[in-house]
Amino acid sequence: MYTRFPYNHVSIALDQGLQNIYSFGRKVYTNPFSGGFVKERMDQGVFFHKKETKCVVYKLTVNEEQFNEIIQIIYQFERFSANYRYNLLGIFAIALNMKLKRDNAFTCSQFVATVLGMSGLKLMKKSPELMRPDDFALIPTLELIYEGKLHEYQNYVQPAPFPVRNVIGV
């Protein structure tokens, strides 16, 4: 309701079947204050409880070196996930168009923008601290591959064998 944009969350997936999805968000569905680095699953958490969730899926084609770098960056986040927290103050800073960088704290869009930037992909003109989920739709190199209900996505796409050389964002 606040942003008036149709989508308010962004994740990064490493496969077309959306089996390996990473972001920053709620660790426990019922507790909005328990947030941090999360490996999201379609059959758990918010996606499980919100069956009618609408989504948009974009594909970014990358080379093998960039893909491997993205994997390594995400796995470092996963390995040290206990050190990270959700950047709740960052949400307010973004609303005020103020750049607020906090150590080991990210919003979902800051995380995705940071991973892409650290991998050498300079796709955004904004700094990661100012990125909103709707900003990703403005990146011309992203290819729209699906828009609709998240639970219907599996019927739309046949999962490719892992690893694919694409990075998928939701």
Image (cartoon, helix red, strand yellow):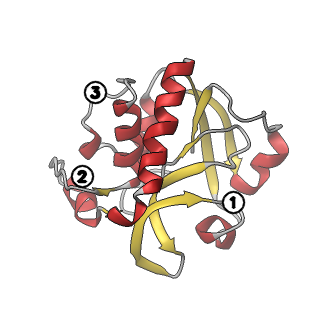
Determine if residue 108 is in view: yes
Q: Which of disc 3 and disc 2 is earlier in sequence?
A: 2
Residue at 41% over, 33% down: 116
Residue placed under numbered mark 1 in the picture: 42
Residue at 24% over, 55% down: 95
Residue placed under numbered mark 2 in the picture: 94
Kindly state the secondary structure of the residue where label 3 is placed. Answer: loop
Residue 125: numbered disc: 3
| 63 shown above or below 88 | above
Q: Residue furthest top?
A: 63
Residue 135 falls left or right of residue 39:
left
The amino acid sitting under disc 1 is: Met
Give the class, few, some or many, for how many residues have Cα within 10 Å of label 3's Cα (few <14, many ≥20).
few
Quadrant of image for the N terminus: bottom left
The amino acid sitting under disc 2 is: Ile
| 167 shown above or below 39 | above
Q: CA distance from mark 2 to mark 3?
A: 15 Å
Q: Residue furthest bottom?
A: 30
Q: Nearer the viewer, residue 100 or 92?
A: 100
The amino acid sitting under disc 3 is: Lys
Kindly state the secondary structure of the residue where label 2 is placed. Answer: helix
Q: CA distance from mark 3 to mark 1?
A: 31 Å
Residue 156 falls left or right of residue 32:
right
Q: Nearer the viewer, residue 96 or 107?
A: 107
